């Protein structure tokens, strides 16, 4: 095994089997799991976020699961600082840690730090917020597609916070938001081993549809209804929640809402795959292969 401490990251699209594999590997290496799923931080979001079960949380220590309230501001920069502090502490007890998640920007923040972005005038930020309140997100998405197609094809288009941030930078600088990415990497005092979870597209989409049906049975619509007073919060501007807020506003009937939930989840998974596949440092594994074969592949990477 390498001399440096190792952060083993399991990444990939939603419903690909990352969490199950992370549990098995954490038990094998007798270590802890760090969640890099930006929706699993929030205690109030349960039915729609596929968090580990109570039994799984008892089996292995998990971090950044139910760590924050939806009323708390916790962005990717906050996560970077908190996660690095935690990783430093956990490496005092472990040689290897496991990070799992599909939120690419949050993973990247831990791996190599965040890109420096220009300071945005508060007046512009307020104006953009007002535009979204009045006209919705579609005009900003059209503007982003025209001025920065690279970021448009990477970003979660159901996440208003990220769309607004990109438009702020584009309007402030006249440059594509994506041009500020990848300019600097911050060295880390640990080795990054990045494993991507590869699943056949047809199987993945079947998993996504099945998971959404299970979420609905577990009370997703009822959970979202209870959160209507907080729907303006950034934590709730997310896939699986915005569609159902629309249902309760009378925009869609239930059948159409469920269709949108499944469609948007599949689209999100496609964008996740596109984002991670651009990283040449990620080694891809099929979670349905024999456990010993998976372990051999990871051990080979650890000893390279």
Image (spheres, rainbow, N blue to C red):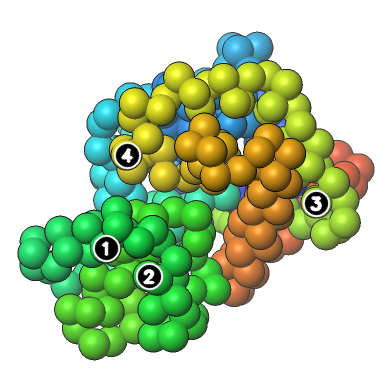
Question: Residue beneath label 2, please?
Answer: 140
Q: Nearer the viewer, mark 4 or mark 1?
A: 1
- Residue 139, percent across and down? 40, 71
Residue located 57% across and 49% down the image:
102
Which quarter of the picture shows residue 210? top right
The residue at which mark 3 appears reads as 205
The numbered dot on residue 232 is 4
Side of 174 relative to 217 (left or right): left
Between disc 2 and disc 4, whose residue precedes? 2
- What residue is pinned by disc 1? 131
Labels 3 and 2: the sequence-earlier one = 2
Q: CA distance from mark 1 to mark 2?
A: 9 Å
Is 53 positioned to the left or the right of 115 in the image?
A: right
Query: In the displayed image of the protein, which residue is found farthest to the right?
Result: 290
Residues under labels 3 and 1: Cα distance?
A: 34 Å
Please give the count of numbered marks on the rendered protein. Answer: 4
Badge 4 element: loop
Give the Cα separation between the discs numbered 3 and 4.
30 Å
The Cα–Cα distance between marks 4 and 1, rounded to whole angstroms, is 15 Å
Q: Nearer the viewer, mark 3 or mark 1?
A: 1
Circle 2 packing at 10 Å, graded few (<14), some (14-19), many (20+), is some
Measured in 3D between alpha carbons, the distance from the residue under mark 2 to the one under mark 4, in whole angstroms, is: 18 Å
Residue 48 badge: none
Instruction: Looking at the picture, tell me which residue is in the foreground, 4 or 106.
Output: 106
Circle 1/circle 2 CB separation < 8 Å: yes
């Amino acid at each position: 095994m390498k001399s440096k401490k190792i952060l083993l990251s399991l990444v990939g699209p939603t419903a690909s089997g990352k969490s199950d594999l992370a549990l098995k590997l954490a038990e094998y290496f007798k270590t802890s799991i760090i969640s890099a799923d930006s929706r699993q931080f929030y205690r109030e979001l349960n039915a729609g976020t596929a968090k580990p079960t109570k039994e799984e949380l008892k089996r292995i220590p998990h971090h950044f699961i139910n760590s924050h309230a939806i009323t708390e501001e916790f962005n990717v920069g906050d996560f970077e600082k908190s996660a690095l502090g935690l990783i430093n502490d956990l490496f005092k007890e472990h040689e290897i840690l496991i990070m799992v998640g599909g939120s690419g920007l949050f993973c990247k923040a831990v791996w190599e730090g965040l890109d420096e972005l220009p300071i945005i005038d508060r007046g512009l930020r307020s104006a953009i917020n007002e535009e979204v309140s009045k006209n919705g997100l579609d005009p900003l998405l059209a503007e982003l597609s025209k001025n920065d197609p690279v970021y448009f094809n990477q970003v979660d288009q159901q996440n208003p916070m990220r769309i607004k941030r990109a438009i702020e930078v584009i309007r402030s600088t006249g440059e594509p938001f994506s041009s500020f990415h990848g300019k600097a990497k911050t060295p880390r005092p640990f080795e990054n081993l990045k494993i991507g979870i590869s699943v056949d597209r047809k199987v993945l989409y079947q998993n996504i549809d099945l998971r959404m049906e299970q979420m609905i049975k577990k009370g997703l619509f009822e959970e979202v209804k209870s959160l209507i007073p907080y729907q303006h919060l950034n934590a709730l501007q997310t896939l699986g929640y915005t569609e159902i807020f629309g249902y309760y506003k009378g925009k869609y009937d239930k059948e159409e809402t469920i269709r949108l939930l499944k469609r948007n989840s599949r689209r999100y998974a496609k964008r996740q795959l596109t984002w991670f596949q651009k990283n040449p440092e990620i080694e891809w594994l099929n979670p349905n292969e024999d456990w010993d074969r998976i372990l051999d592949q990871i051990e080979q990477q650890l000893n390279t």
